[in-house]
Image (cartoon, rainbow, N blue to C red):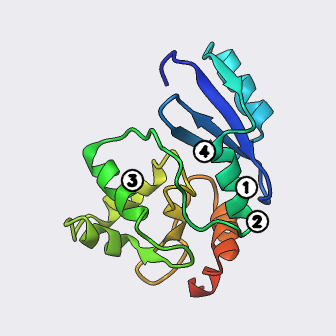
């Protein structure tokens, strides 16, 4: 993050706290941490921010958690390598309540041998949920990883009704 003014918000209705960091262009990060903790971290790093609990991202994510929304229309301001951006765009094409494998995503972006790299791009995704990396499973339909912890990935899959697709 550079020294531009960031906007913090939060979404309600999930089993874990969700804090949103946005720039003037759109959502840049989603953190599974309380707003106060994120604000404290930004303050310690001398990064300017304001709090706006009425941001469209807050509203849409709260609607998602309550089952009233399946797609997001909010702008995003996501930054990454060309490969990461290709993966993240492909993730946004996985429908609500569905899952795909890392291999499926690799094939979708024209890199069929890049399953591991797809997994790394998923792990680097700064805006989970909006870019739904939780919908990606291993080739044998196991959970795989999730940068914010498997309990959050499991909760998101359960919310969408797709946890039954996971193998044990």
Disc 2 on helix, strand or loop?
loop
Describe the element under mark 1 as helix, strand or loop. helix
Task: Please tell me which of labels 1 and 3 falls first in the chain.
Answer: 1
Q: CA distance from mark 4 to mark 2?
A: 18 Å
Residue 15 percent across, percent down from the top left: 80, 60
Quarter of the figure with residue 129? bottom right
Q: Nearer the viewer, residue 165 or 27?
A: 27
Q: CA distance from mark 2 to mark 3?
A: 28 Å
Q: Nearer the viewer, mark 2 or mark 3?
A: 2
| Secondary structure beneath label 4 | strand
Q: Which residue is mark 3?
A: 121
Q: Which residue is mark 1?
A: 62
Q: Secondary structure at mark 3?
A: helix
Q: Which residue is mark 4?
A: 30
Tell me the quadrant of the picture where the C terminus can be found: bottom right
C-alpha span from label 1 to label 3 = 26 Å
Q: CA distance from mark 1 to mark 4?
A: 13 Å
Disc 2 designates what residue? 66
Q: Nearer the viewer, mark 1 or mark 3?
A: 1
| Left or right placement of residue 63 versus residue 2 in this view | right
27 to the left or right of 52: left
Q: Reply above or below: 42 against 150.
A: above
Residue 85 — which label? none
Q: Can you say whether 18 is above or below 91 in the image?
A: above
């Amino acid at each position: 993050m550079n020294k531009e003014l960031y906007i913090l918000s939060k979404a309600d209705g999930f089993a874990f706290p969700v804090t949103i960091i946005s720039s003037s262009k759109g959502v840049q990060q989603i953190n599974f941490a309380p707003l106060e903790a994120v604000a404290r971290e930004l303050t310690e790093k001398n990064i300017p921010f304001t709090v706006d609990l009425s941001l469209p991202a807050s509203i849409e994510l709260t609607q998602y958690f309550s089952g009233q929304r399946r797609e997001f229309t909010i702008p995003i301001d996501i930054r990454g390598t060309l490969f990461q951006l290709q993966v993240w765009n492909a993730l946004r094409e996985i429908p609500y309540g569905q899952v795909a494998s890392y291999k499926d995503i690799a094939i979708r972006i024209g890199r069929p041998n890049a399953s591991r790299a797809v997994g790394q791009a998923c792990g680097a995704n700064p805006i989970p949920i909006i870019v739904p990396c939780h919908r990606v499973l291993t080739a044998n339909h196991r959970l795989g990883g999730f940068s914010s912890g498997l309990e959050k990935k499991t909760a998101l899959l359960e919310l969408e009704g797709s946890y039954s697709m996971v193998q044990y």
